[in-house]
Image: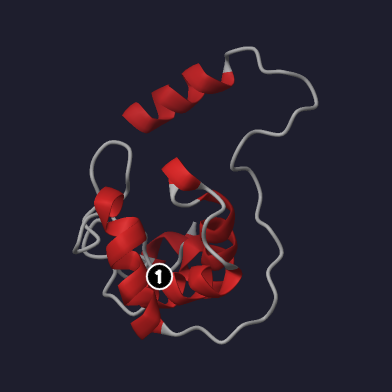
Amino acid sequence: MQAVVDYITWVSKPQPREEPFVGRGLVHLPSLQPDPKHGAQIYATQCAGCHGQQGEGRSPLFPPLWGEYSFNDGAGMNDITKMAAFVQHNMPQNRMGILSPQEAFDISAYIHSQPRPAFNHAFERF
């Protein structure tokens, strides 16, 4: 409920016209072969400071990337290519643009090799 209230508050504020929001959209990346082992090394140096060594996140700014409270296997980020495009364009937040497309694919493959909750398909009936 708090997230809904925060969103409504944010969307109610005036925004500059015809200027894209920072972090909106995904960049186009070439098709690359991800290497999750290399991704683990990059994650440890570039991502763990915010998202935690075990992907647990740091509330409220940095979401968990795996484990019980992470995004589920029905989320948009559950696609390595989409996640890599987001990571390459937006991460790390304090040094955006330092990761190569290959590094973004590797990090995404590593994150995807970790456990995450299953989507509750019971809601699909509605």
Quarter of the picture containing the N terminus is top left
Would you name the residue on which mark 1 appears?
Answer: 73
User: Along the horizontal axis of the image, is 95 left or right of 3?
Assistant: right
Eyeballing the image, is 58 above or below 55?
above
Dot 1 alpha-carbon crowd within 10 angstroms: few under 14, some 14 to 19, many 20 or more? some
Corner quadrant of residue 39: bottom left
Residue at 48%, 63% (x, y): give it.
77
Residue 33 percent coordinates (x, y) = 56, 87
Task: Find numbered disc 1 in the image and state the secondary structure of the residue it sits on.
Answer: loop
Q: Is residue 1 visible?
A: no
Count of labels in the image: 1
Corner quadrant of residue 61: top left
- Between residues 32 and 80, which one lies in front from this camera angle? 32
Residue 105 percent coordinates (x, y) = 52, 74
- Tell me which amino acid carries mark 1: Asp
Residue at 26%, 51% (x, y): give it.
49
Eyeballing the image, is 73 above or below 98?
below
Residue at 56%, 60% (x, y): give it.
88
Residue 53 percent coordinates (x, y) = 20, 61
